[in-house]
């Protein structure tokens, strides 16, 4: 009888995937490195080679098979553009209906200038990733999230501008830290998910990205291009990033010595470093860096890049057989992957103290993407991303606006990009406007374009016109290396123009009705010079958010007071930009070195109220930071947010630095008529420069000039201070 019970229990464990076996590496009282050593001794060679992939599991040893998710602005369950795979419905292949909360594109998250908002996005993604690993219908399950993108958008022609937080190293660093903390959680031992930053380093041209080199000196490496990654590791706690396709100064990034010498040994990234998708193949076939795949795989492993996003096994087997690498080299490379698995609780076995392990197990609970809390978070954060670029008083719409014509390709659809998941619901601009109109007794008429001049005819009969247009982010790829519209761009394709294709339609509708508002729904800046000169009002919002419509309608009607800010310099002319392959930003890139007057400066955005700045002053300092305080009064007629920005320059060594650099910011809410004392904290480590001779960051000496204002070009109060 006992033998029968034992047999039944064994069969049960096989079918349920349960394991009664315990292993010494599951002892959570041991140090992390000890546990990794113990696991390493039990791995077979095949298992060690398997751990060079994105799958961190070892099923034989009770370590679950878990993969990775894209997560720039919401979990994409199946990777780029596949939304957890496709299924056939009525003869057509459509995405599986496994939804996740979809926020604005990363570019829009950057425009919030709000650390807590970005952190909240990370928290929601982590909750949903944990939920889906418990759901049998999810074909792909993962706890490593490819986010944030810590690349810097030094040029608006970059096809992946939509994935970035902007052009500034400090802002991108702060928001990257916030995203990492949101994804990983605040538990002292366990991570909710693992934040894998991308793409290290200086990956901001798409055309030729698989073979080109981004060339610049070590000072720009330290102070600009690597800074957000450095902060994500040392301050955020990320222990994972992806090496870029391109090279730096002639050496492909996935084998670059800087990965080990700086990222691992100096910064402490003892976790994952992975190639980008297909990186091994491109190392051989595009960069022509090695004669064959075995040599390429050996170089990747010896660089301590321990995860391939590629078909690598045959190449690694050959490299072992030929003596190009040893088993010890593989063990060194995969230690970081195992560490990440350990931090996620994957090495604990069934008896784990991981507080995140039970998320999603309660089948009666509301899925995390359907909770009222999640819906509110998406709506609030999308609201915060809206940028008011121009307003002559037309907005917010008043009681005299009773009939509105809505025009444009993005009025009644939300376009999802290459890294979007499937939202549980969506509210288009037109849908939200109709909701608002029904409440207020306003007539809304819609037409997608100006065919046969019909939109112009409708505009003449209306009190206002709303035009919703911009770029198409190509969420479903028609041709990998082609965008039919020159000003469009996406992964693998850079933009060839900054002109808004529909600006002629905008001009015609404006002629028909001067009360025309442009709602620019776009992943990047445009040179909309005519619109800026002539239209009474312009809003900017990025693609993808399931609450896009509510954010726009709320801003147009004054339910919210927009306070988003630009995160790039919007140039007036493409000729204001240097050569796209010039990575030395000192030659005229970003607000720090831009020579021509911009259309919209970095940090710019308007409000429906006014903010008055008092005199700023240093109120406290110690060895770690300097605190600057400034009184700010909402002197207008509406409550609103202000994004207070602090820039610095160094009068004594002005020739060696840009004219100004962002070093602190705070987004604050001030009620009308009230004054707040705003404190801006500047880390002393950010008041340093890279000394190539000393090979170290060295504190600045002499005077520091503090500039506080509403944008990089709108300084309201400034003073000198001897540091």
Image (tube, grey):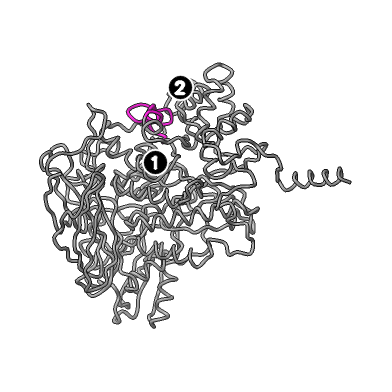
Q: Which residue is mark 2?
A: 290
Circle number at residue 537: none
Magenta span contains residue 253:
yes
Visible residue check, residue 582: no
Question: Within the image, what quadrant is residue 253 found in?
Answer: top left
* Mark 2 to mark 1 CA distance (whole Å): 31 Å
Q: Secondary structure at mark 1?
A: helix
Could you say where residue 33 lies in the image, as x and y percent from the top left? 51, 33
Bounds of the magenta span? 244-261
Could you say where residue 303 lies in the image, as x and y percent from the top left? 45, 26
Magenta span contains residue 159:
no
Seen as rendered, the residue at the extreme bottom is: 441
Could you say where residue 499 lies in the image, as x and y percent from the top left? 29, 52
Could you say where residue 342 lies in the image, as x and y percent from the top left? 54, 40
Q: Which residue is mark 1?
A: 233
Question: Within the image, what quadrant is residue 575 found in?
Answer: top left
How many other residues sit within 10 Å of disc 2, few (<14), some (14-19) or many (≥20)?
some
Q: Secondary structure at mark 2?
A: loop
Is 152 situated left or right of 684 in this image?
Answer: right
How many other residues sit within 10 Å of disc 1, few (<14), some (14-19) or many (≥20)?
many
């Amino acid at each position: 009888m006992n033998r029968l019970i034992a047999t039944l229990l064994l069969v049960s464990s096989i079918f349920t995937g349960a394991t009664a076996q315990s292993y010494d590496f599951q002892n959570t009282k041991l140090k992390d490195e000890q546990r990794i050593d113990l696991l390493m001794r039990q791995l077979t060679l095949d298992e060690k080679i398997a751990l060079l992939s994105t799958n961190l599991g070892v099923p034989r040893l009770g370590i679950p098979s878990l993969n990775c998710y894209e997560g720039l602005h919401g979990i994409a369950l199946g990777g780029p553009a596949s939304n957890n795979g496709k299924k056939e419905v009525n003869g057509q292949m459509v995405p599986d209906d496994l939804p996740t909360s979809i926020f604005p594109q990363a570019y829009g998250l950057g425009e919030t200038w709000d650390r807590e908002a970005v952190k909240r996005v990370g928290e929601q993604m982590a909750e949903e990733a944990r939920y889906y690993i418990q759901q049998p219908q999810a074909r792909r399950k993962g706890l490593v999230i490819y986010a944030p993108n810590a690349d810097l958008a030094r040029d608006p022609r970059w096809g992946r501008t939509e994935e970035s937080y902007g052009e500034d190293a400090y802002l991108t660093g702060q928001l990257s830290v916030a995203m990492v903390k949101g994804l990983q959680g605040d538990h002292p031992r366990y991570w909710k998910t693992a934040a894998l930053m991308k793409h290290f380093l200086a990956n901001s041209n798409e055309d030729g990205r698989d073979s080109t080199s981004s060339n610049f000196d070590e000072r720009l490496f330290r102070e600009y291009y690597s800074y957000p990654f450095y902060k994500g590791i040392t301050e955020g706690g990320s222990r994972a990033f992806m090496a870029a396709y391109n090279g730096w100064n002639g050496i492909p990034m996935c084998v670059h010595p800087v990965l080990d010498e700086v990222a691992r040994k100096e910064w402490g990234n003892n976790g994952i470093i992975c190639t980008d998708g297909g990186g091994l193949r491109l190392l051989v076939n595009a960069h022509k860096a090695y004669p064959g795949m075995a040599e390429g795989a050996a170089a990747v492993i010896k660089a301590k890049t321990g995860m391939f996003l590629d078909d690598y096994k045959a190449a690694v087997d050959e490299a072992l057989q030929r003596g190009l690498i040893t088993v010890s080299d593989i063990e060194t490379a995969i230690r970081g992957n195992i560490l990440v698995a350990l931090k996620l609780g994957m090495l604990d076995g069934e008896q784990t103290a991981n507080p995140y392990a039970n998320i999603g197990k309660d089948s009666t609970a509301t899925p995390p993407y359907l909770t009222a809390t999640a819906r509110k978070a998406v709506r609030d954060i999308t609201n915060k991303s809206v940028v008011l670029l121009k307003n002559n008083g037309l907005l917010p719409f008043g009681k005299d606006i009773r009939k509105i014509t809505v025009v444009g390709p993005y009025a009644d659809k939300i376009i999802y990009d290459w890294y979007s998941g499937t939202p549980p619901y969506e509210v288009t601009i037109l849908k939200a406007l109709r909701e608002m109109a029904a409440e207020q007794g306003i007539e809304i008429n819609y037409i997608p374009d100006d065919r046969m001049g019909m939109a112009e005819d409708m505009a003449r009969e209306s009190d206002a016109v709303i035009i919703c247009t911009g770029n198409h982010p190509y969420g479903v790829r028609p041709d990998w290396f082609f965008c039919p519209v020159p000003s469009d761009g996406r992964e693998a394709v850079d933009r060839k123009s900054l002109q808004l294709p529909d600006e002629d339609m905008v001009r015609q509708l404006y002629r028909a009705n001067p009360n025309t508002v442009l709602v620019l729904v776009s992943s990047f800046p445009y040179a909309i010079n005519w619109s800026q000169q002539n239209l009474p009002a312009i809003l900017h919002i990025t693609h993808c958010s399931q609450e896009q419509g509510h954010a726009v309608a709320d801003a147009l009607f004054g339910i919210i007071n927009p306070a988003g800010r630009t995160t790039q310099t919007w140039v007036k002319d493409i000729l204001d930009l240097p050569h796209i392959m010039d990575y030395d930003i000192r030659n005229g890139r970003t607000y720090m070195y831009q020579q021509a007057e911009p259309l919209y400066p970095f940090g710019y955005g308007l409000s429906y109220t006014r903010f008055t700045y008092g005199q700023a002053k240093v109120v406290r300092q110690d060895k770690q930071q300097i605190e600057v305080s400034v009184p700010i009064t909402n002197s207008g007629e509406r409550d609103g947010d202000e994004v207070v920005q602090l820039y610095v320059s160094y009068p004594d060594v002005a020739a060696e630095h840009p004219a100004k650099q962002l070093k602190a910011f705070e987004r604050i809410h001030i009620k009308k008529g009230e004054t707040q004392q705003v404190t801006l904290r500047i880390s002393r480590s950010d008041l340093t420069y890279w000394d190539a001779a000393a090979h170290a960051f060295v504190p600045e000496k002499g005077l520091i000039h503090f500039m506080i204002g509403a944008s990089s070009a709108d300084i309201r109060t400034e003073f000198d201070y001897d540091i």
